[in-house]
Image (tube, coloured by chain):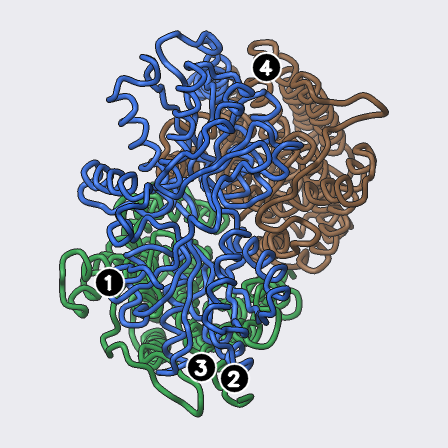
Amino acid sequence: MRKKISTLLTCSVLLALSACGLGSSGSDTDSDDTIKIGTLFSVSGAGANLGDKMRKGAELAVKQVNADGGIDGKKIDWVFYDPAGDTSTAVQQTNRMLDSDGVELIVGGGGSSGIALAMDPITSGRGVAFIATEGARQIVEPAAEAHPLTFKTTFNDTVMVERLIAFWKAHDITRVAFMPDTSSFGQSAQEELERLAPEAGIKVFTAAFDPAANDLTPQVKRLAGNDPQAYLAWTITPAGVTFLKNLRSVLGDSDVMVMHGFGFVDDRYMQQAGAASTGTILVSPKLPVWDRIDASDPQQPVMEDFATAYAEEYGGEQPNVYAGQAYDAMMVAVAALRATGGDTDGEKIADAVEALGTHVGVTGAFKFTADDHSGLTVDDVAVIQWDGSRFVPVE
Amino acid sequence: MRGRRGASDGTRRRRTAWELWVTIGLLVVLPLLAATDYSLHIWTRMAIFLILLTGLNLIQGVAGMTSLAQAGFFGLGAYAAGISAVRYDLPPLVALVVAPVVVTLVALLVGVLSMRLKEIYFTMATLGAGFVLFLLFGRMVELTGGPNGLVGIPPFSIGGLEFTEPIMRYALVAVLAALGAVVAHNLLVSRTGRALRAYGASEPAALAVGASPFRLRLLAFGLSGFYAGVAGALEAFDSRFISPSTFDFMTAVLLVVALVVSGAGRMVGPILGALLLTGIEVFAADYADYEPLIMGVIFLVAVQLFPRGVAGELAVRWEERRERAQRTGEAAGPAETAETARTTRTTGTDGAPAMIEEVGR
Amino acid sequence: MDTGLLIQVILSGLSVGAIYALVAVGFGVIFNATGAINFVQGEYVMVGGLSAAMLYEAWDVPVLVAIVAAVALTVLLGVLTEFGLLGFGRLRTPASITIATIAIAVIIKGAAMLISDRDTYALPSVLGAGSLQVWGASTSRQTVLNLLLAVVAVVALALFFQRTKLGTTLRAAAGDSETLQTFGVSYRTTARWAFVIAAALGAVAGAGLAPLTVMSFDSGTLLGLKGFAAAMLGGLGNPRGALAGGLMLGIAEAVMSGYGAAAYADVVAFVVLLAILTLRPTGMFGTAQAVRT
């Protein structure tokens, strides 16, 4: 018996050893016929739903590129890990990708801003380019000084909020009830909105909520006391469904404007809120309404191809904006790699990304410059509405 | 009986010393076996876990009380150090001192409030404390950076010497981990330590000899907080980024399970637990979608297989073998004693493993 | 307007509190039988709500049938939990059982994540989608049903513990398996019944919660912990205490959301947990001995 246990002990130590020690044997000897791209998305833990969509988007891009013969004949060798929403696990996995797996370029920052922020110092420290798919603008700002090798294919909250304010102004709305969740997604938006709205003469009343909350009527009723003209929620969690239902229940038939941020652009969520979601207005990339926009928009065919290919690959499933962002990030990396002739040196890739000019992607027409590593502008934002069965553009 | 007790005390001390040398030996040898940047990073994580578990071992293994606050304390240490460095520009060395002091004070406060509770109630109070800390890390945005995390933590440095090379970062953590193990070992063989262990098994026993269980437990809990504070500060300077997700309920649970499974109350328990935690983390990463499922199964199987922990199980077998050897050498009479001794050990089982034998006699 | 907000806060508190109460009762049943804290309780809520919603949405089963099937499935899971914990005869102390329940909770959540493919699912209320207007405030019709369910569950359990033979043995088991053995009832049998009851309560809570929001594999964990805080508040193991504790915790959170710093609403449960353990560890209605003598 004792023997058995000592064997077990030795095994567990060996396991730990082999896992990290021996794993490094194949590193740094990057073969000439592949390019190793590493990706982290949280496909388990809170937010697993989004992580899974992002993984599908990135995976689709890799498959398409490889099926087309790769990058100058080199296939993408894709390495994927799941940090499960935890930054310290993500740090460990980033080190593993760079030091042990021989990853040359990183696309995708774990699916949460916190993780991308934790990864950036590591990739930058090794001179590796990093194309993130997360929202917080601190990931890439200030670009030239602090994040020369890091890019992202998502909207800055600033851009979204500017679009919102323009929309409110056009509709003579000056009093807004704002309900962000307490995650990083909600908190970043709150900072931007409370900074920009007063300058535009819009009064914002804020009541935050926990992403796991099951009833938001106290917040809604509390905000109703300020007589707002519009209610805006900012979340990616199912609590957004509760928001819609509670709002209908508390406000009855009164015709205030009900709004959601771009994190909630999801057919499923809308359907699950039932009648309460009809008429909800959202700020979003153009992807959900790709078949309703002007065919002259250069983005239109890109979105159509993506939506078709995605549905084909994943059994008829419609892509959401997160899948689109991840797809874009991978495609920006590929475009840059094609420009450098497959050279994965961080600075060369960064120069190539900045020299792409206009990269028409699924999420928008990216114009990366030395000072703007986010690349999207107000022109890329659409205001859309759920008509009860699908999203349609709003004039 | 009295003579035998003395002998057993002697063996215990030797055994603990042997276990201490295993711990320190592994800290020295492991990086020599595999010293790439990545493996050094892994060993650094392992050593941070070791510090956390050494602290947890004082309250879990020695006083026999399960604390689910260790992850919260870990986080408090990390934020105390990170905030000192980022928001108040304190030198890292000062932050490394501030963090454990802050955590110890909070641990003592939590301890004073919850220490008189029965085991399971105490555990739930620590769960509450850990959760409140975790939620505050995410909510106090101005101070902690909120859910996005605290960015811009400098590397650890003494004077002008910056600890940026992986080998130096490992050395820093390993030296402190070894120091922590030595302190814990000395405490365990000291009079206070023995009183603590006696208490962990039986409260009346402690009261009978006039020890104050409350004060002893509080000491153990405060110390476990101190260790968590050091580990937190090291985590902050090693990752140079901290966010609430690292210090959640799951981390608290994993720490306790890893310690229980590897052998709470043993000097060698923490290092085994730390190896287990890092091993699983590295191993599970290859099975993205099945990771939570695999983790759960491993822990259930481990808890069922080793309710006393691997090290505790090992010790019991070892004792049994020795007794068998004794029995074959002696007449039928002493065999009975061995039989009774075994019963004493097995009845108490998992809460405070392997410590029971001493008090039982 | 002010009274409107006050009523709204109370209604919201009762709505969420009824769910907490059902979860809290489940914790008490297991605690009485095994002396352990069953961290799977929150996952029973998730499984009950999620599987009912999945059955309804994916297979188009009538709502009531879906709920009954979900309760049956969760009860089966309860039996399996008991086997996973006590079936090997190796875990004896409440502390070690408690730790093992966490492992089982992780397994169930991990499996649910894969089975549901991380999607969210919705379940309509059996009472329809409309809401009730009460003095300038409003709540979902489901709230009334949930309150009713919580009260019925508590009364039924109280009667069960006092009037039936099984109930008396279950109550006798509270921290004293030796007494049980002298009665000729095995510890395993009582434990199994306790898990059946707890799982059923959890599933009912889940089916009651689903119409208020939507369910995913992640819906149970935090709810379980808050339900536990409610159980402590009322007195662990006391069904009436669980009801009171659940409703009070629900209202406390709603007050924080409606009047205080809304962002801190979820901290309330854990501050309450700490406070009650410090000030009155047996809870408001508790009888169990919580402090060392």
Q: Which mark is residue C71?
A: 1
Q: Which residue is mark 2?
A: C5
- Which shade is chain A? blue
In whole angstroms, how far apart are the C-alphas of marks 3 and 4? 60 Å
Q: As displayed, is residue A125 above or below residue C108? A: above
Q: Which is more N-terminal, label 2 or label 1? A: 2
Q: Residue B53, position in %: x, y?
A: 61, 35
Q: Which mark is residue B30?
A: 4
Q: Which chain is green?
A: C
Do the residues indicated by labels 2 and 3 lie within the same chain of the protein?
Answer: yes
* Amino acid bearing label 3: Leu
Q: Which of the two residues, B165 or C66, is positioned nearer the viewer here? A: B165
Q: Residue B123, position in %: x, y?
A: 57, 53
The chain that hosts pointer 3 is: C
Dot 3 surroundings within 10 Å: few (below 14), some, or many (20 or more)? Answer: many
Q: Which mark is residue A197?
A: none
Q: Which of the two residues, A65 or B209, is positioned nearer the viewer here? A: A65
Dot 2 surroundings within 10 Å: few (below 14), some, or many (20 or more)? Answer: many
Dot 1 surroundings within 10 Å: few (below 14), some, or many (20 or more)? Answer: many
Which residue sits at x=21%, y=36%? A313
Q: Secondary structure at mark 4?
A: helix
Do the residues indicated by labels 1 and 2 lie within the same chain of the protein?
Answer: yes
Q: Are marks 1 and 4 in contact (CB under 8 Å)?
A: no
* Amino acid bearing label 1: Val
Q: Which mark is residue C11?
A: 3
Quarter of the rendering containing residue B6: top right
Q: Are marks 3 and 4 in contact (CB under 8 Å)?
A: no
Q: As displayed, is residue A337 above or below residue A251? A: above
